[in-house]
């Protein structure tokens, strides 16, 4: 199944900044009929809406707290009252960057609430209509941290493993039920959105810090091509093959590439609670 953007109604969580903003602008430029941004930052979302409207696109922003089930239900009803949703892009996410013993119960709960539980809340709003129409697309922006555990990401990496498990199981269930919907799991390495400010990479030619616009373009290209998995950069996909190696060998390889040192200089957006990836 392909997910053409021309004429589609596209909903993007965490659409006010970062990858979400780039996806919104890119989808509008590719002819999407309606862009719906869900974000906790209504002011920033409104700025994206204005930018899309400036070149003739149709867009709207709805303030949603994805960690609040009632907020998601209300936003879902409001969105659907104005028309169907053809494509859902689960993009919102959060990272603490803390060492395990520094994590509070609230840190862990918030990470899983936004990075995992929100997927269930959002998809539940729009999947019934897609199944009824036998057409639609569910996209989740996970992370390469869902391929291998990383130091200072015991909450984030685990949540991305869970997000991937959710999407793989949903895809399997839809296929088993004979429902022809498109799904796509996106697993990028670090992206220069500001969310991971301070991270470093030892081999930038093989594992570069990715450009947000390039990532968005690759996601949109993959949707329209009907791909179901996208790992960026391509070299990061090699970890899938390496997982069959004995643990000490895998650990040696990840240490060689400096994976567990990438977060040593992490600062991120300290103090902010942004729903973005």
Image: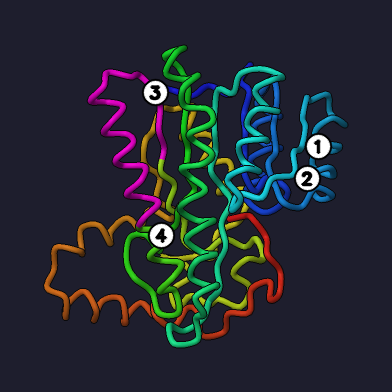
Element class at badge 1? helix
Q: CA distance from mark 1 to mark 4?
A: 30 Å
Vertical placement of residue 10 versus 193, above or below: above
Residue 230, position as x, y percentages in the image: 40, 45
65 or 272, which is in the foreground? 65
Which residue is painted at 20% across and 64% down in the image? 242
Instruction: Please report contact status of discs 2 and 1: CB closer than 8 Å, yes or no.
Output: yes
Looking at the image, residue 154 sits to the left or right of residue 91; the answer is left
Which residue is painted at 52% across and 48% down in the image? 118
Quadrant where the N terminus sits is: top left
Judging by the rendered image, the residue that carries numbered circle 3 is 181
Vertical placement of residue 265 versus 95, above or below: below
Instruction: Please report contact status of discs 3 and 1: CB closer than 8 Å, yes or no.
Output: no
User: Label 4 crowding class (10 Å Cα cut-off): few <14, some 14-19, many 20+?
Assistant: many
Q: Sequence-wise, which precedes: disc 3 or disc 2?
A: 2
Judging by the rendered image, the residue that carries numbered circle 4 is 144
User: Label 1 crowding class (10 Å Cα cut-off): few <14, some 14-19, many 20+?
Assistant: many
Residue 57, position as x, y percentages in the image: 78, 25
Residue 175, position as x, y percentages in the image: 27, 26
Judging by the rendered image, the residue that carries numbered circle 2 is 45
Camera-side mark, 1 or 4: 1
Looking at the image, residue 11 sits to the left or right of residue 235; the answer is right
What segment carries the magenta color? Answer: 162-184
Q: Sequence-wise, which precedes: disc 4 or disc 2?
A: 2
Vertical placement of residue 179 versus 251, above or below: above
Tell me the quarter of the picture where residue 178 sits.
top left
Q: Sequence-wise, which precedes: disc 4 or disc 3?
A: 4
């Amino acid at each position: 199944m392909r997910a053409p953007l021309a004429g589609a109604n596209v909903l993007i969580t965490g659409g006010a900044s970062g990858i979400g903003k780039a996806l919104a602008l890119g989808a509008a430029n590719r002819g999407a009929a309606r862009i719906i941004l869900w974000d906790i930052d209504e002011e920033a979302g409104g700025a994206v809406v204005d930018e899309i409207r400036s070149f003739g696109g149709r867009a709207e922003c709805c303030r949603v707290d994805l960690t609040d089930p009632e907020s998601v239900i209300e936003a879902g009803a409001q969105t659907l009252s104005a028309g169907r949703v053809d494509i859902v892009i689960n993009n919102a996410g959060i990272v603490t960057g803390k060492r395990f013993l520094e994590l509070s119960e609230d840190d862990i709960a918030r990470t899983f609430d936004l990075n995992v539980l929100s997927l269930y809340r959002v998809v539940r709003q729009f999947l019934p209509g897609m199944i009824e129409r036998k057409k639609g697309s569910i996209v989740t922006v996970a992370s390469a941290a869902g391929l291998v555990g990383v130091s200072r990401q015991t909450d984030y990496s685990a949540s991305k493993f869970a997000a991937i498990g959710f999407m793989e199981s949903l895809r399997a269930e839809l296929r088993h039920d004979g429902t022809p919907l498109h799904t796509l799991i996106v697993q990028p390495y670090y992206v220069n959105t500001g969310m991971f400010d301070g991270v470093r990479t030892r081999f930038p030619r093989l594992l570069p810090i990715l450009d947000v616009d390039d990532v968005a373009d690759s996601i949109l290209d993959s949707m329209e091509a009907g791909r179901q998995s996208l790992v960026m950069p391509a070299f990061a996909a090699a970890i899938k093959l390496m997982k069959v190696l004995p643990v000490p060998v895998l650990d040696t390889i990840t240490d060689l590439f400096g994976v567990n040192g990438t977060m040593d200089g992490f600062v991120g957006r300290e103090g902010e609670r942004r729903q973005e990836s």
